[in-house]
Amino acid sequence: MMDLRSRIYVTAGLVFVVLGLLLIFQVQSLGKLRLVFCDVGQGDGILIITPGGKQILVDGGPGKKITECLSSKMPFWDRNIELMIPTHPQQDHIEGQIDVFEKYHVGQVAYTGVENKAQFFAQWKKDLQNERTKVTIVKRGDRISVGDVSLDVLWPSSEAEEEWKQKAPADLNESSVVLRLSWGSFCAYFTGDITKEILNGLLYKQCEVLKVAHHGSKTGTNDQTIVKSGAKIAVIQVGKNNRYGHPKQEVLDVLGEYKVNILRNDLLGTIELDTNGKQVTEKTDR
């Protein structure tokens, strides 16, 4: 039988071992770009971890599942989100960010300024004001950098924003922020719920990864989308057995026709893509 002092020493030793392993894991992750497509159910929530260990959050899904994903992918001692971007003010993209405000310090929020009259958006706006974080209203042509990772804003246009100042867009999906992430020669498209009519006019560079618009709805993807994006990997953020029937078979057929690797949250859980700028490796929950 161990005495109390021996038990304390053993416990302390185990704690140091665990902390050491976590630190080793974190150090090994540095130098790579990590794209984590969190399994948030029927919604979008993407954690981007830069090679320097900074965090960017695009959307947040419904409910509170996004913070579960953050806690599993970020070091436990890191409570900072350097940049948070809600693509547009719908519940399946923004509600989870309310819980992020509660549990993390958010350094900067970048969004379109388009609002929603729903209660969840009122709470999000209140939390944003209470956080006293830096707020940036973005438009096409803007570039936001976190370390050596750049996010180019491809949509909305300044003309659309001027129109929305007079009247909110009839379809909030059309107000989605569209981003192209760049790190060295690697790039990826993040498309919110944008329509293919808008998206296809924005894609002018071939990128390895495409976050498929609107959870695989037929409104966001067609042949032109795949050809112009150049994507080899398509991630569909979608909930299991969702009532919308996403992703649509015609979208899956198009992706299959062009031999794009399809990764779906409803089938694979949380999806992580790691890259050293040349090769991309996949990790999934299932």
Image (tube, rainbow, N blue to C red):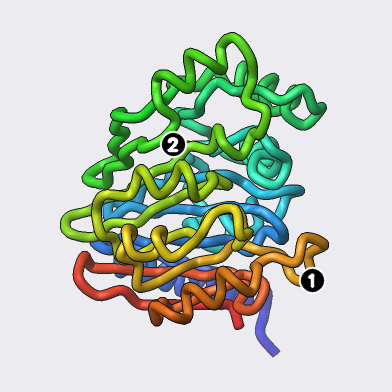
Front residue (pair 50, 151): 151
- Which x, y percent locates residue 241? 79, 71
Q: Are marks 1 and 2 in contact (CB under 8 Å)?
A: no
**Which mark is on residue 241?**
1
Placement of 6 over or under 135, stated as above or below: below
Residue 5: give x, y in percent of width and height: 61, 72
Q: Is residue 181 above or below residue 153?
A: below
Q: Between tags 1 and 2, which lies in front?
A: 1
Front in this rendered view, residue 74 or 126: 126
Find disc 2 in the rendering and name its residue: 83
Q: Percent x, y for residue 155? A: 42, 34
Quadrant assignment for the C terminus? bottom right
Q: What kind of residue is marked 2?
A: Leu
Give the mark nearest the N terminus, 1 or 2: 2
Residue at 33%, 52% (x, y): give it.
50
- Circle 1 crowding by C-alpha within 10 Å: few under 14, some 14–19, many from 20: few
